[in-house]
Structures are given as structure tokens and as C-alpha cells.
Amino acid sequence: MIGVGFSINDIIDDVLSEIDIINIENPLYPNYLNSDYNADVESFLKENYGKAIITDGSYIDLNPGTPEKDIKKIVMSKVQQSIDFATSVGSDEVIFLSTFLPMIGIDFYDNGHIDNSISFWKEITESNKNITISLCNIFEYNPNVLLEIVKGVNHSNFGLAFDVGHAFAYGKITLKEFYESMEPYCKSVYLHSNRKNADEHLDIFEGELLRSGQLKKFIPLLRGKNIIFKLFDKTRVRENIDILKHLLSL
């Protein structure tokens, strides 16, 4: 299925006929969950779009792998708020970015992040069994830490999501290599491009993703997954959907 990421108040009506999934991004926006968003939810539900819904979870400054107990309480609260919001709009899945920082490169940091994250997500999944919760790559060089976490949590409603743009910008292996080991745990994939040096969320006609040749080789592996465009500028989103459908057909 194909989807597009939107603000709950800024869904592009003439794209709806081309997509199966609405990805609601609002919990990603700092302080959105501190606002009174009930009117947004009511307005969204009244539209009755008839699409699958996938929601982003809070991210900025939130680290589920933190060793600080007081910080963990704050992160836990914001993650639970994200799940509650996702449930209120009828989401099938809520996706959280990992926050892991591979450039630290110290074993005790890596191991602590893994152990703390496993404990954190076990607690969250046990309390929220009726929605899929997925952890998504951002700065990772490879999927190893994500795989350790998902295997350690070992819960039926906890999995991974793959972000193509993040892996293209920060990964030190090919997209195919990055994705293949994640695939058994992955329902959804975020798609956007960049110039391979920053997380620019360009459409796939921009940046280096299409020109590199990696996208053409990689896209056929995604058949059967949810593929969601995460574009800052949605001017050419219909053209992006058309080329994605073409690549999936090869």
C-alpha cells in the first residue's frame, strides 16, 4: 500500500484517490501534544477518509534508551501520549524514531542504549497491546542495534520501520543490505531523498537517491509493505507516486 505523510490539518484532497494510507505527522511536531488537539481529531474523523492510518510518535529530545530515571519518566509520558493520539485517530501503527547515536562509538553507550530501550519498550508494549508500535532508523550506520532491541523486546505488537532517506544519508552500507535484515520485522517504509549528507526529505526526483541507481534496485524488495512518502515539499507528490508504482511493477 502507498501513503503520504500529512499534518492532520493539511491533507491534500486531490492526492487521496492515489493512496491507501494517511500518515499523520503531528505528534512529531514539538509541543503539539501539549496543545488542545481534540478539535483536530474530531475534524479528521468527520471526514471519514476510508484510508488506513499510520501515525508518527514524538521524537525531538526524547530518548527511550536514556539511563536517567527522571528523563525516562518524561519520555514514557510523551510516548504514551503519542500512542493515545494514534489510537484516537484510528491508527493501525505508530512509528517512533530511534534516537540512537552511533557516532559516540563507545561500547558502554551502545550496550546501555540497547538494554534501556528493551526495558522501556517492553513496558510500553505490555500496556498497549492493540496497536502496532514500530521503531525506525534515523542516524544508524547499520540496523544492528535496532535488531538487538526488537529481538530483546520480543513482543507480537512491536516491530521496526525502515526510513530510506535516513539510511541513504547516514548508513554505511547499501539500502538493500540495511533493509534485508530488518524486513521480517518491518511493516512500513518511509521514502524520501537527499543529497547523501543531511536529512532533507526531498522528493525522489531531487537529491541523489534516484540518480544513484540504488532506488531502482531496492524498491522491488518493498512489495507487500506500506510505503509512505515523507516529503517536506509535496508539490510533486503525484509524480512521485507514479514513479513508485512504475518501479514496483518492474
Image (cartoon, rainbow, N blue to C red):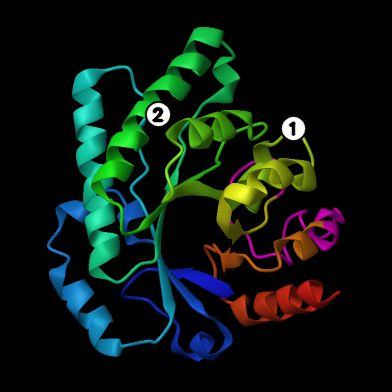
Please tell me the numbered disc located at residue 172: 1
Q: Which mark is residue 180?
A: none
Amino acid on which disc 1 is placed: Lys
Q: Nearer the viewer, residue 35 or 65?
A: 65
Of callouts 1 and 2, the N-terminal one: 2
141 shown above or below 94? above
State the image quarter where residue 198 is shown: top right
Q: In the image, what residue occupies the spot 28% across and 36% down? A: 123
Give the mark toward the camera: 1 or 2: 2
Q: Please name the amino acid that badge 2 sits on.
A: Ser
Asked if 129 appears above or below 21 in the picture, the reply is: above
Residue 236 is situated, as x and y percent measured from the top left of the image, at: 63, 77
Q: Dividing the image into 4 quarters, which one contains the N terminus? A: bottom right
Residue 240, placed above or below residue 98: below
Give the residue at mark 2.
117
Q: For the magenta stretch, what is the residue range? A: 195-217
Nearer to me, 97 or 83: 83
Q: Quadrant of residue 201?
A: bottom right
Question: Quick check: can you spot residue 196?
Answer: no
Where disc 2 sits, the SS reads: helix
Q: Quadrant of the C terminus?
A: bottom right
Q: Residues within 10 Å of mark 2 (few under 14, many from 20)?
A: many
Q: Is residue 81 left or right of residue 108?
A: left
In the visual, does 31 lie left or right of 179?
left
**Residue 188 falls inside the magenta stretch:** no
Q: Position of residue 17 (x, y in %)?
A: 53, 91
